[in-house]
Amino acid sequence: MAPGAIELHLGDNLDVLARLPDASFELVYVDPPFNTGKRQARHRLRTKRAADGDRLGFHGLRYATVKLGTRSFADAFDDYLAFLEPRLVEARRVLAPHGSFFLHLDYREVHYAKVLCDAIFGRASFQNEIVWAYDYGARSKRKWPAKHDNVLWYAKDPERYTFEYDAIDRIPYLAPKLVGPEKAKRGKTPTDTWWNTIVSPTGKEKTGYPTQKPLAILERIVRVHSKPGDRVLDFFAGSGTTGEAAAKLGRSAVLVDSKRAAVEVMARRLAAYEPRCVGFEPRARRTRGGRAAKDEAVERASLDADKAERAPKERVTLELAPKRPATPRRAAALRPRKNGATPARSKAAPASRRSTGAAAGTASGV
Ligand SMILES: C[S@@+](CC[C@H](N)C(=O)[O-])C[C@H]1O[C@@H](n2cnc3c(N)ncnc32)[C@H](O)[C@@H]1O
């Protein structure tokens, strides 16, 4: 791949990974979905003798089935790990000898996946568990609100890996007065807890892809864990955040996703870098005039379907106040006057529109 080149692949990542050569990427970052669609509930059953039982046994005796419980919780993780394992093995294979692997998960999956990663990469290769902390959305009153994701970092060779200390961005001191003006001005390097707000639902960065991660998080990973000209791989690429970070920082990137909606979003987002598209022809490139709008509608519908399909996790949702019915009195109040004067807005009206303002979110305050 030429330096700075971007490749987008539509397809199952296991198939695409199989075509990638050994040791060909200095940095691999993945943010897999938990909902793989393979979850199964296995019921544990016991039988006991009963004249009116639902099962027939030896000598015509009848038995009743007793359901002991559903092991769906453990099985969901078994299925998830079975889905992840071959992909993680491939991730290690395609990693350069001094390369780094990042696995982005949430608190429900991370402990199971850590054990799996230790087995694949070796415990000695584990470097950090980065906690991405945000502070946005509903707050539970029954437990501590979960407001973080976990990112595991493994170095293929724990003795030799890229860590560009001088490329780390600096963050403000919490108590700048304690460190003096010069240090306060320079800021400090972050720890393994990274405070960063979510992608603002109303901001410029938003692509509309449901699980988009903040560019600032990916930029930090790419800047510190690779060098200009290096090759970056994300095989659960979604909206292409990793690709944008890589391209902005002069790295090349291979981005893979099995969903048409994702590769379309990436093709549009990364158009300035003229990506090579493998396994699909981006709609934006082949549409003319009226067809573009139709294709966008198809894509939007596909994104909506993705949203509906997602695992029942706590997600950020905007709460829009319900539309008030237009009573004749209210409609009359809002109708423009003959003299051109704008009618005074009822006090309640802005409140229903104000809700998206909350989307600017409350960054951590840190
Ligand atoms: C959590 S999203 C990634 C979001 C991304 N980090 C971003 O910032 O936009 C996970 C992505 O993995 C994709 N995916 C799931 N299974 C896949 C598979 N077997 N092969 C390739 N992509 C897959 C989904 O379509 C989804 O877009």
Image: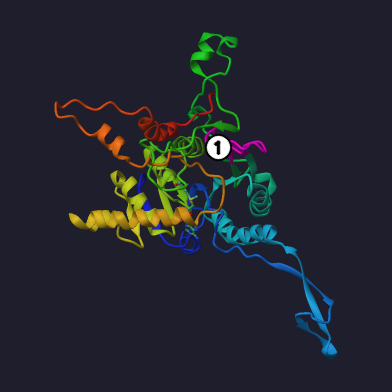
Q: What residue type is labelled 1?
A: Ala
For the point 50% across and 62% down, the residue is: 14
Query: How crowded is the residue under tag 1: few (<14 C-alpha within 10 Å), some, or many (20+)?
Result: some
For the point 45% across and 36% down, the residue is: 219
Residue 147 is situated, as x and y percent measured from the top left of the image, at 58, 37
154 vs 87: above or below? above
What segment is highlighted magenta in the picture? 129-149
Is 72 situated left or right of 297 in this image? right
Residue 199 is situated, as x and y percent measured from the top left of the image, at 44, 38
Residue annotated with mark 1: 138
Q: Is residue 327 visible in this depiction of the protein?
A: yes
- 189 vs 349, nearest the viewer: 349
Residue 282 is situated, as x and y percent measured from the top left of the image, at 30, 57
The reply to whether the magenta stretch includes residue 137 is yes
Q: Is mark 1 on a helix, strand or loop?
A: loop
- 5 vs 278, nearest the viewer: 278
For the point 40% across and 35% down, the residue is: 356
Quarter of the rendering containing residue 54: bottom right
Disc 1 within 8 angstroms of ligand 1 (CB):
no
Is 4 situated left or right of 178 in this image? left
282 vs 359: above or below? below
